[in-house]
Amino acid sequence: MCGFAAFLEPGRTFPAALLDGALSDLVHRGPDGAGRLVEPGVALVFRRLAILDPSPAADQPMTDAEAGLTLVFNGEIYNYRALRAELAAAGARFRSNGDTEVVLAGYARWGEAVFERLEGMYALVVIDRRRGLAVATRDPFGIKPLYTARRGAAIGFASTMRPLRRLVGTRPDARALAELLTFGFAAAPLANLEGIERVPGGTVVRVPLAGGEPTSHRFHDVLDGLAGTRDLAPAEEAVHDALARSVEAHLASDVGYALQLSGGVDSGLVAALAARATPEPILSYAVNLAPSPHDEGVHRRPVVARHGLDHTEVPIDGRGFADALPRAVEHMEGPLPHMGCAMLMLLCDRVRARTKVVLTGEGADEMFGGYRRYAIWRKLALQERIAHAMPAALLPDRAPFRGVRRLVGRDAAVDAGTYVDVRALQRLFPALLPSSGAREAASRRFHDMRRRLFAVDRAAYLESLLLRQDKMAMAASVEARVPFVHVPLARILDRVPLGTLAPGGATKPLLKSIAAAYLPASLIHRRKVGLTLPFEDWLADPRGLGRALDDLTAPGARITQWGEAKAIRERVAAFRRGERGALGLLLVRLLNLETWLRSLDAPLSA
């Protein structure tokens, strides 16, 4: 795990001040070392978090002078040993023991075809002097971030937006704001700021070094597998084996690893499979919200005991959360897609004291159908058909018709992933209504509601969780790994019949069946909670999160540039009078957005 920036413009020598600033922007992603390459038309800067082969032999930028290649690479390639053996058999020679040189040698031999061979998480830029190209790409699921920006003839790529802000400036993107308000996350290619985009997962971008228009193509689309033949029966043994192999592959590290433990099936199963593959006790860490009823400690304890984990509880309360929120938003480079991000960052602060790597259970819900929407997919499909067939005015605004009214003119597979009152938001921000975007495009590719739900989650919601894991862990200079989001596992899952994967009436039944061999039944079959936080209590504390409510009503509130100031003040006043329910969630989303907009006022470091 590392961070890089690449700047390209024919004939230009990029100033040292720009490169020094970019290195400063990236230091949290790589405190173990720094490097740069500068030549006419090209400048690369790199910060290293040394995990595989921590020696200087694996430093970057890495150059193969004979092949005319230079690489900057962020991520981990879990099948690098197999690729290295294949390349060595073909005559390649290696001076390091990590994965970076394998990627470079693979590109030298196979060209861009190497990207489809890489199993892992990655974002990278190759300067290919023989072809006269800079080639940038990102792993198929978008686990590792990659941003791009353009100003005139200058083009940049970077692991975070901050280096690119030095190229194009800092202006919120109204299109992204509309999605941030509605969904909590702007789907790629939107990246929150004007002039900056996120490169979609599995996409190659080619930039001619001599000038000319960049081109791009998708070498791996993770939605393609959803339309494939689902012929794997029986499925459980094959999926169990693929998941176990994924967890074992994600343990590759020369500096140790830890586990991020909640109290649910996903992280518990990762812990169990990792413990089975590891002879010594594994470090594990959990956010402790006690005495809040949302704390999941009672469900963690059996997992810790059964699998012999070396466990640490990290206590966090509302005031600690309020203190951490600005830092989390700064590193997220946007509003937090889930307010639990701040908790994950604080947890990784503790992880960093003992290791640089943490495995998580992220992605299981999106890959195995873990949300309530997968249990009620038949109801969603029926409601959508009715909503599209009847005028909204004919439906009363009360249960059981309210769910149908909500879907008038909307896509049920997209709407199912919203967790706030969209109509209330529209009244506050009438000019910021999201247009049809990546979510709707993904849903339109399929007919079956289950395929549509999986497609929307893979196209947008999953990346929001992957980016939060990356950015919150990297805020503490820790690498987060996600064994549930692994292309070899996805290829197996895409062959599982939908009736097995998402039959309706239950959530992720296949994964729960696999987990039965490792976890208590009381944990497996309890109601899903996730990292639920007591926001109403925290907002009511004027010394905690409640102090930030004043930011929404202050004369200089940034959010009022986009919304109805009077209406926002009225919502804050209503909460302070004691109104609760959905209002608390609405105010948290507004506070989240206001905190980000204020963070943009801070100057970039020199």
Image: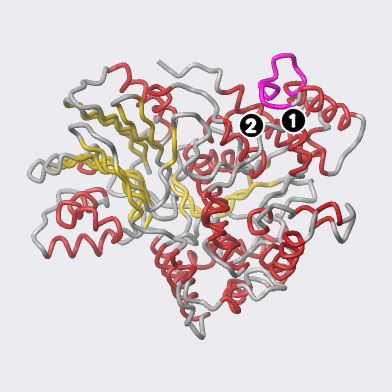
Q: Are marks 1 and 2 in contact (CB under 8 Å)?
A: yes
Cα gap from disc 1 to disc 2, whole angstroms: 9 Å
x%, y% of residue 10?
Answer: 20, 27
Q: Amino acid at mark 2?
A: Leu
Q: Which of pointers 1 and 2 lies earlier in the amino acid sequence?
A: 2
Highlighted magenta segment, given as a residue range: 552-563
**Which residue is at the far bottom?**
234
Q: Secondary structure at mark 2?
A: helix
x%, y% of residue 211?
Answer: 21, 32
Magenta includes 57? no
Q: Secondary structure at mark 1?
A: helix
Left or right of 216, for residue 369: right
Q: What is the quadrant of the C terminus in the image?
A: top left
What is the number of the mark on residue 325?
A: 2
x%, y% of residue 532?
Answer: 72, 49
Check the image and report above or below for 537 versus 276: above
Compare residues 132 and 440 and report the one nearer the observer: 440
Compare residues 504 and 281 and report the one nearer the observer: 504
Number of numbered discs on residues: 2
Label 1 neighbour load within 10 Å: few <14, some 14-19, many 20+: many
Left or right of 116, for residue 262: right
Asked whether residue 361 is in view, the answer is no
